[in-house]
Amino acid sequence: MSLPWTIAKQIGIAPVNLRARPACLEQVSAAAATAQTFTIAIPCDHPIHQIVISVAEGTASPGTLVDGDLVSAELIVNGNKYIKVLTGEMIKNLCIMNKNKQATGAYTLYFTDPKIPEAKPLPGHLCTTITLKLVDNAPAASNFHYINVTLLESLREAGGDFSGILVEKYLSYVSYGTNTLWQDYNHERAYRIYSYLYMMDDNGTLSDTKFNKVRVIGMWSGGEDRLSDELLVLHVKALNQAEYMNALDTGFMAIEFPNGFDSSKYTSLKSQLNIPTAGTKIQLRVVERYVLSA
């Protein structure tokens, strides 16, 4: 296994300096037809470029690769630093954004990122612990889940620090109930933001139509910046498809900021989305993608 061509060229790593290896033994459901949380200790030996996850289901290993069975993933460094907080669907759509649409049952977590040159590998050799927590849903009757995790590492890179780590997580799951018109979603205000990935649903059902417009507004002592101003959601989706060469899934859209913007200057930073018609329980999560500074 190798890094995608764009990433390998971007970081200039020689093939002999890159290794793919299993992060752990295959993880198997403790009981048939039962959801659980898998807590996996990731080796802390080398800088990590990617973590590749596969999820299969069946009565015996290797099972059949399946989509939709990974509910969420969290990557935690040194016990309390949450680097990734994502749903399985979010991971799939982040891969589409990187022009690396995943096969059935496959998920990739990025540290070195083809769209963000500032992003560096996770310095595993400087971490005391790296923990991957995966939550699944219940397999079908009599079935188990079979989860495998692979690391893509650099072998001959030493030194480094924790600056340049790509953080991808959503901060909150906001419900607007049956409200209509413009609604606020407040963002992080401490880092250099590269993109927002929006996950939109009505009572848990993903939808492209519950919101029809989006804008991003930053307020600061010197005035107001409109980082995005009343874009139609259907136009954002169309622009995403043209950029990524694959459509994002239903209920997802992305607004990106090439070269990033400094969110720390703002006293308030929010997305506002318009709800044209009341739903049952319209909800929103937004993945914030930013790089840690020194």
Image (cartoon, rainbow, N blue to C red):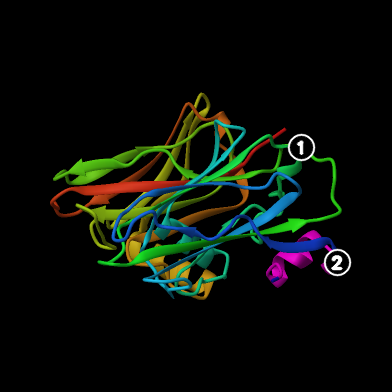
Labelled disc at residue 161: 1
Q: Is residue 108 magenta?
A: no
Q: Is residue 70 above or below residue 265?
A: below
Residue 210 position in % (x across, y down): 23, 57
Q: Tell me, yes or no, whether the two marked residues, 2 and 1, touch with CB atoms within 8 Å.
A: no
What is the secondary structure assignment of the residue under circle 1? loop
Q: Is residue 6 left or right of residue 57?
A: right
Nearest the viewer among 34 and 186 is 34
Q: Residue at x 21, y 49 (%)?
A: 282
Q: Is 176 situated left or right of 114 in this image?
A: left
Whether 224 is drawn above or below 244: the answer is above
Residue 262, position in %: x, y?
60, 37
Q: Quadrant of the C terminus?
A: top right
- Which residue occupies the foreground of this view, 82 or 127? 127
Circle number at residue 16:
2
Considering depth in this image, is 211 or 232 the residue closer to the camera? 211
Q: What are the residue bounds of the magenta stretch?
A: 2-15
- Residue 271 picture location, percent across and down: 39, 43
Picture quarter containing residue 65?
Answer: bottom left
Q: Residue at x 73, y 43 (%)?
A: 123
User: Of label 2 and label 1, which has the lower sequence position?
Assistant: 2
Q: In the rendered structure, which amino acid carries the disc numbered 1?
A: Asp
Neighbours of disc 1 within 10 Å: few (<14), some (14-19), many (20+)? some
Q: Secondary structure at mark 2?
A: helix
Q: How many marks?
A: 2
Disc 2 residue type? Val
Q: Which residue is more in the foreground, 135 or 112?
A: 135
Q: Residues within 10 Å of mark 2 (few under 14, many from 20)?
A: few
Quarter of image, res 18? bottom right
Report the side of 215 relative to 9 (left or right). left
